[in-house]
Image: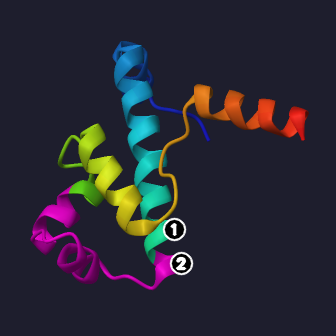
Amino acid sequence: MMKSKVAKRIQDETPEEVRIFVRQYTDIVVRINRLMQAKGYTQKQLAEKMNKKPSEINKWLKGNHNLTLKTLAKLEAELGEPIIFTSEEQLRKKRRKQIA
């Protein structure tokens, strides 16, 4: 599919940090949705468990709210699985496997 000149210009003018933010936020939201699905949680149920309004959960999952690390930690605690993986975590796991 050929991009229009306007679409190409917009893409070319989009700062790299914005592209990175969009990619990372998308990855985080996909991960949260997968964990919710695995637990059988609706947005409303997750909101109740986290003592939040359903509208706040919806904002998180629609990209209308900048998730803080504290919020991500609360989500991870409630969902019982990591949401984001840092390279340090991956290095520690790799080292443990090498030792075992």
Q: Residues within 10 Å of mark 1 (few under 14, many from 20)?
A: some
Q: Position of residue 41 (x, y in %)?
A: 38, 82
Question: Of residues 8 and 95, which is closer to you in this image?
Answer: 95
The chosen color scheme is rainbow
In-image side of 64 versus 84 (left or right): left
From the image, which quarter does the C terminus lie in?
Answer: top right
| Residue at image point 25% right, 49% down | 71
Q: Magenta region, mostly helix, strand or loop?
A: helix
Q: Position of residue 93 (x, y in %)?
A: 72, 38
The span shown in magenta is 37-59
User: In the structure shown, which secondary structural element does the residue marked by tag 1 occupy?
Assistant: helix
Q: Is residue 13 visible?
A: yes
Q: Which mark is residue 38?
A: 2
Q: Is residue 67 visible?
A: no
Kind of residue indicated by mark 1: Arg
- Among all residues in the image, which is located at the extreme front? 100
The reply to whether callout 2 and callout 1 are in contact (CB within 8 Å) is: yes
| Residue at image point 51% right, 68% down | 34
